[in-house]
Image (cartoon, rainbow, N blue to C red):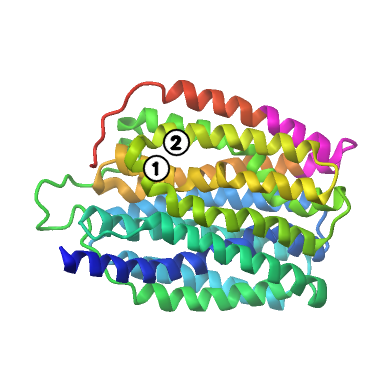
Amino acid sequence: MQDSIKLGRKLTVHYSLIQAIYIMGYCSIYSYAAVFLLARGFSNSQVGLTLTLSSVLGLVVSPVVANFADRTKRFSLRAIVAALLVGMTVFSALLFIIPRPVLGVGILYVILLAFFSSQIPLVTTMAMDHINTGAPINFSLARGIGSFAFAILSIVLGYLVDDFGAGVIMLVNLTLGVLAFLLVVSFQKARRGGEAGVDGEVEPTGLLEFAKNNKRFIAIVGSISILFFSHVTISTFMINIIEHVGGSSSDMGVANSIAAILELPAMALFPLLYKKVHNAGLLMKISGVFFVIKTVVTLLAPSVFWVDAAMCLQFFAYAMFIPASVYYVNEVISGADQNKGQALMGMVMGISGLIGNYLGGLMLDSRGGVSFMLTVGLGVSFVGLIMLVMIDRKKRAISNE
């Protein structure tokens, strides 16, 4: 028992460092995407199109990579993630070197995002594999520490961009890629579900069979993708929202950091909440309500202060949703198909990005601007919330205690 606790603490520290690097990578690649691309001569519509195409590629690549990870006996999760990190680092270097033209930068950025998005569900499964075999990794705490790291980088990167220009974003991302590689390859391997010698484990299914056997889960992913519409547009075009109320890149960094700092206590406390409720679906619905409320406050914000106030609601929205969605997959998907389940849940952002980034860019370039984008986002996300409540209304059997 003591050995298990000691191992859990050791793995939690290591995994927290991995999450910190990855969430900082999300900050530099996604949260500052519009800043980087606008500085390279993109219009708002072109930024939206670029991120939409990256979502399309991610939706194709991510489940394929996850299916490969579930079924392969030759390569470990660490090896697969490390290979993706190498690819991501190479494209970050190319984006730093190549300033023009728009088409070339756009293609490189699309591929970079595909490499990054394909890793996230695999990194999640690295922790869940240990949890399911008895090692008490505190996933929520690790993810919360990642959010705190996001907050620090968001502030620092905002000032760096103001002082040195948007090119510094790719230098930061390059450094994070190297650090992530070192942390991932040194992470202790867990015994995977479906490996020889694990009694009672079923073999992983193919993608089509998985979708056929988990129709309700697929519908849940679809409803959450619609719910996330406003979250995606706010995250991607935060610089436009901040400038709309009179702020700058450094103000954007502060707003993002406020949201991220509040994610740490929310995610750290999530296991206690889950032990009492033990219903990840219910917790996802509660967080969905706060997604809608956050959009309302952002829409009505007359100043940077009120945008910051809206970001405070991240405590109950995104910060609760992320661990809830991970535990939801662990509840309803068999261990042998965990990578596919986590990948499909991770595709929520990709599907939302597919719709939100492109339409958000178009709406920003229209006469309605920021207000029009946020109003449409509010309506779409409210529909997604209603769909989530209706689809997940029936009590589910728990497949993994």
- Residue 209 in the image: state x and y as whole percent: 30, 36
- Between residue 176 and residue 357, name the one nearer to us: 176
Kind of residue at disc 2? Leu
Answer left or right for 171 relative to 251. left
Residue 108 numbered tag: none
- Residue 248 in the image: state x and y as whole percent: 84, 60
Viewport quadrant of the N terminus: bottom left
Residue behind mark 2: 283
Quarter-of-image position of residue 18: bottom left
Magenta residues span 361-379
Residue 273 numbered tag: 1
SS at badge 2? helix
Q: Is residue 65 at least partly visible in the picture?
A: no
User: Is tag 1's residue or tag 2's residue first in the polypeptide sequence?
Assistant: 1
Q: Mark 2 and mark 1 in contact (Cβ < 8 Å)?
A: yes
Q: Residue at x 63, y 53 (%)?
A: 259
Above-or-below relation of 212 to 46 = above
Answer left or right for 14 relative to 48. left
Quarter-of-image position of residue 256: bottom right
Above-or-below relation of 287 to 114 = above
175 part of magenta stretch: no
Q: Residue at x 55, y 23 (%)?
A: 386
Q: Residues within 10 Å of mark 1 (few under 14, many from 20)?
A: some
Kind of residue at disc 1? Leu
SS at badge 1? helix
What is the count of numbered marks?
2
Answer left or right for 155 relative to 285. right
Separation of residues labelled 1 and 2 (CA atoms)? 9 Å
